[in-house]
Amino acid sequence: MLTGRGVEMAPTAVAAPATRPLNADGIIGGVQASMPALFRCVLRYCAAAVLATATASQSLAADPLASVERQAMMRFVADSWRDAQRADGFLPYGYDFLADRATDDPASAEYIVRQAGAFHAWAKYYALTRDERYRESLRRGIEALAKRSIPIGKSRTQRWLEATRILSVPAGRLTLRAALARSGLLYRRTGPGKLVSADGQYSGAWAGATALALLAELAYSRASGDNRYADLRSAWLEGLLALRIPGGGFRELPTSIDDDADYLNGEAWLALAVYADMHPNEENVARALAEIDRSLMQRYVERPNVWFYSWGAMAAAQRWRTTADTRFVDFLKEQAKVFADRFERELDPDGNHCDAMEGLAATLGVLVRSGDDRSELAGRLRSLLSRQAVVLPQMQIQRDQNRMKLGGDAYLASPRLAEFGGAFLLGRYQPTTRVDAAQHCLSALMMIDRDGLDREPGTPMPVRR
């Protein structure tokens, strides 16, 4: 979760160091700062929503302009990304306004994973709006991820060994990994697959980056009809499948035999779920996905995990939309109850929790579409979404904004803020932005808008776009 706390300071203004300005990669664009009328409306809507969700029968928002306001926030993100995209195809990664420094590290795994995630969210927004202004930018992003991809394959011996479930043996795992590495049975440097790598090395080729890159291409190709990346799509699919552990989840890296990175399991499950929905005749994917459905749902029912929650909820929601199998609805309900009963209490009330909102919105969308939108659980999810949504306008940096509150009477004065207009902070009082904060907020707002989650329970569903 995005849970960083604001910096506590004396009740006075804190000016950021006056170092050289950012170059043309700085983000320009969006809506006016100093709380324009549009965002005053957002705050009025959110305050109303908190009161409205006192009962399960009420909707996320009573204000009929709520959808317009959501759309303005989403468009601000997408337009700012388009204006700020760098020459290498990637987006500005993040900035620490208190330290007055960028937080980019292009060789880190986090950098490449979050870039891929941002392009996935952006491609979904393109699919929602069909705004052709974003088409070329998305192609540049996919091509940037392609340039960071390295080949991978498996020998017949490796496939046979993995089919014995040797990678799931609990004892002697360090010895097993070392033996497989010495024998060349962890991976091959040639083959039909590709993995997105942060640094061009197999030790930096995280499964999550490839899963999110695949999701970005799938969303782009579905919305645009542009099939130029079909070979790349197949290669990323093969790379992801190369990291699947039979009877388990996904290896974190080609150099690892572990599948205990919970968010990676969720990201990879979602990627295969979306792929199978778009390509239902590929039997190898269908077989692998059927096993993944069973193994991951069993694991996370027995051991719920907050890092898996949102990605797993989105994957299960996609599987239900594809198959209409009620197992996925039951899984979503169980996971949502655990989140509401346990995980939600652990969230920083001032933090940015758009990632959690994605899981809640995915679940509520399924409940609404399956005719269960008047249930007690649906009411709880609406209330949880409202509590998180109420602070989102305060976390989106505005054009021409040059200061932000740090809690109490303290605030930070920084000319850098305006250069990141459209981005989201990691918390209301945390003077740091990062590209995945906007990724998750854009995605959550889209899901609310797409599935009409602010509608009155029992009213007709919107037509899916």
Image: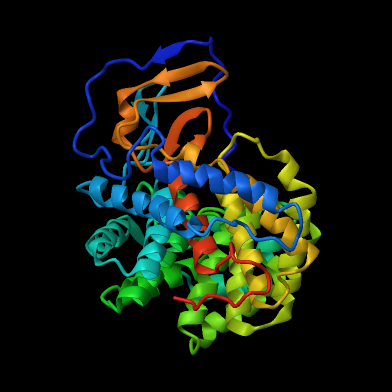
Residue 157 image offset from top left, x and y in percent: 54, 73
The quarter holding residue 374 reads bottom right
Q: How many marks?
A: 0
Q: How is the image coloured?
A: rainbow
Q: Nearer the viewer, residue 238 or 424?
A: 424
Q: Left or right? Give the position of 89 relative to 3.
A: left
Above/below status of 58 relative to 106:
below
Q: Left or right? Give the position of 301 relative to 184.
A: right
Q: Nearer the viewer, residue 233 or 243?
A: 233
The quarter holding residue 31 reads top left
| Residue drawn where x is 48% and y is 38% of the image | 395
Q: Answer whether residue 174 is visible to the viewer in this image.
A: no
The quarter holding residue 137 reads bottom left
| Residue drawn where x is 24% and y is 48% of the image | 83
Q: Left or right? Give the position of 268 relative to 80.
A: right
Residue 393 image offset from top left, x and y in percent: 48, 42
State the quadrant of the C terminus: bottom left
Residue 311 image offset from top left, x and y in percent: 59, 59
Q: Answer whether residue 162 is visible to the viewer in this image.
A: yes
State the quadrant of the N terminus: top right
| Residue drawn where x is 66% and y is 72% of the image | 368
Q: Left or right? Give the position of 430 relative to 92.
A: right
| Residue drawn where x is 22% and y is 25% of the image | 21
Residue 9 image offset from top left, x and y in percent: 54, 13
Q: Nearer the viewer, residue 26 or 171?
A: 26
Above/below status of 73 relative to 211:
above
